[in-house]
Image (cartoon, rainbow, N blue to C red):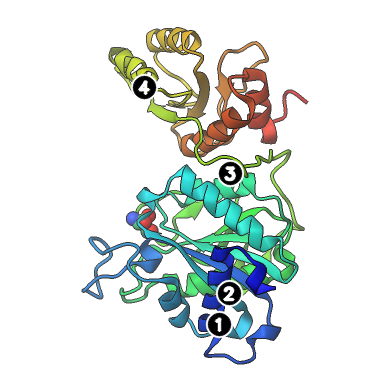
């Protein structure tokens, strides 16, 4: 019964009444939960041509739903305002809470899927957090936009309709968390923002898309498929994760060993290198990096700054951990979750990172 639910769920059911009040028939439609977090999809500007300098996260979920009346023709939607911020304000404490809230809803028999709208800048980080921490075959879809809601040809309304349609689509089950923008459906594990301006920005060059849309109807290329050996992390009891920072490789970085010391002094438990090529760094820097980290029991993950592909595999005896196909920002989330689960246990952390390249069996 609604009255027996925790307070935030009761409030959400109250929102459902508001949200559905313009359509009397939708109780018979598939029920989904929709969490708004802000971003450009909820952005507003005084100018219809402005695509910079607008306020991200200005409009609430009810406004976004009302802007697309077709949504309530295809779903019985529960809209919840989780946050209303530009995505640079999201953090792993919030995204773990979001993951727990989504899991609670997906546990209900009558909820068929979940949608999250999010700023695109850090969307892929929230997406991989949800992908690694939600244990459900029901679809979880994360969506954003590149033009604010007030712009001519704003992309948000159609993107949101497609996301909602995807979350209700039976063929979307068993595919993990998905990112959708600009008519495309991608895996949250691999898809990344590739361009700060274009609408066609979310890509996984190597792994490709899972499918696309014809209008609002999803079309998948393959049978349901998940990332090979993807680990699951239970975040029921975590409010914060171990601090992990990212260091970027470049020529002349031998001068910047003090940055490693400063990171360690600030309390990091892990460092991810955005290495050149397949994880390269200056050899002088690398020697000092490895000894400083080993002395402080700081886990070292090596990724690539190239934007695609996988870096060199680690051997069992290597002190560094290969990020395999994860880019630095996704590797950071994986490392934080793995450190929270395993502590400073390099073999166990390697196993989590080896999901799509299982060298340890
Ligand atoms: N397109 C966007 O959503 C960018 C925005 N700055 C954000 O990430 O919140």
* Displayed quadrant of residue 335: top right
Discs 3, 2 touching: Cβ within 8 Å: no
Q: Which of marks 3 and 2 is nearer the N terminus?
A: 2
Quadrant containing the N terminus is bottom right
What residue would you read off at disc 4?
A: 263
Residue placed under numbered mark 3 in the picture: 206
**Residue receiving disc 1:** 17
| Crowd around label 4: few <14 · some 14–19 · many ≥20 (10 Å) | some
Q: Residue at x 73, y 52 (%)?
A: 225
Q: Earlier in the sequence, mark 4 or mark 1?
A: 1
Q: Which of marks 4 and 2 is nearer the N terminus?
A: 2
Query: How many angstroms separate mark 4 from mark 2 (CA)?
Result: 45 Å
Left or right of 197, for residue 281: right
* Label 3 crowd (10 A; few <14 / some 14-19 / many >=20): few
Residue that mark 2 sits on: 13
Camera-nearest residue between 234 and 224: 234
Picture residue at 52% right of the left edge, 76% below the top: 15
Q: Which mark is residue 169?
A: none
Q: CA–CA distance between discs 4 and 3?
A: 32 Å
**Identity of the residue drawn at 63% across and 31% down:** 341
Whether pointer 1 and pointer 2 mark residues with C-beta atoms closer than 8 Å, the reply is yes
Q: Are marks 1 and 3 in contact (CB under 8 Å)?
A: no
State the residue at coordinates (62%, 44%): 236
- Hey, which quadrant is residue 146 in on the image? bottom left
């Amino acid at each position: 019964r609604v009255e027996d639910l925790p307070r935030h769920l009761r409030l959400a059911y109250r929102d459902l009444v508001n949200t559905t009040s313009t359509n009397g028939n939708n109780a018979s439609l598939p029920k989904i939960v929709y969490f708004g977090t802000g971003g450009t999809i909820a952005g507003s500007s005084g100018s219809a041509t402005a695509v910079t300098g607008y306020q991200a996260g200005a409009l609430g979920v009810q406004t976004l739903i009302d802007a697309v009346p077709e949504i309530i023709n295809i779903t019985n939607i529960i809209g919840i305002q989780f946050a209303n911020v530009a995505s640079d304000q999201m953090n792993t404490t919030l995204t773990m809470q979001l993951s727990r809230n989504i899991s609670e809803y997906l546990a209900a028999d009558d909820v068929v899927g979940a949608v999250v709208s999010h700023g695109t800048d850090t969307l892929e980080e929230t997406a991989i957090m949800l992908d690694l921490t939600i244990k459900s075959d029901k679809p979880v879809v994360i969506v954003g936009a590149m033009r604010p809601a007030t712009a001519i040809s704003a992309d948000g309304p159609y993107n949101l309709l497609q996301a909602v349609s995807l979350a209700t689509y039976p063929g979307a089950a068993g595919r993990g968390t998905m990112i959708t923008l600009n008519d495309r459906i991608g895996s949250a594990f691999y898809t990344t923002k590739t361009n700060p301006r274009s609408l066609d920005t979310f890509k996984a060059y190597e792994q490709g898309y899972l499918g696309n849309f014809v209008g609002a109807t999803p079309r998948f290329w393959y049978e349901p498929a998940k990332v090979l050996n993807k680990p699951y992390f239970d975040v029921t009891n975590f409010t914060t994760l171990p601090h992990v920072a990212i260091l970027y490789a470049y020529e002349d970085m031998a001068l910047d060993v003090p940055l490693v010391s400063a990171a360690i002094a600030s309390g990091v438990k892990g460092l991810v290198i955005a290495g050149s090529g397949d994880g390269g760094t200056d050899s002088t820097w690398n020697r000092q990096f490895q000894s400083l980290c080993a002395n402080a029991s700081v886990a070292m993950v090596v990724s690539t700054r190239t934007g695609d592909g996988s870096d060199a595999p680690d051997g069992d005896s290597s002190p560094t951990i290969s990020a395999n196909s994860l880019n630095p920002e996704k590797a950071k989330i994986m490392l934080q979750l793995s450190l929270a689960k395993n502590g400073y246990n390099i073999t166990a952390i390697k196993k989590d990172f080896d999901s799509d390249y299982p060298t340890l069996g």
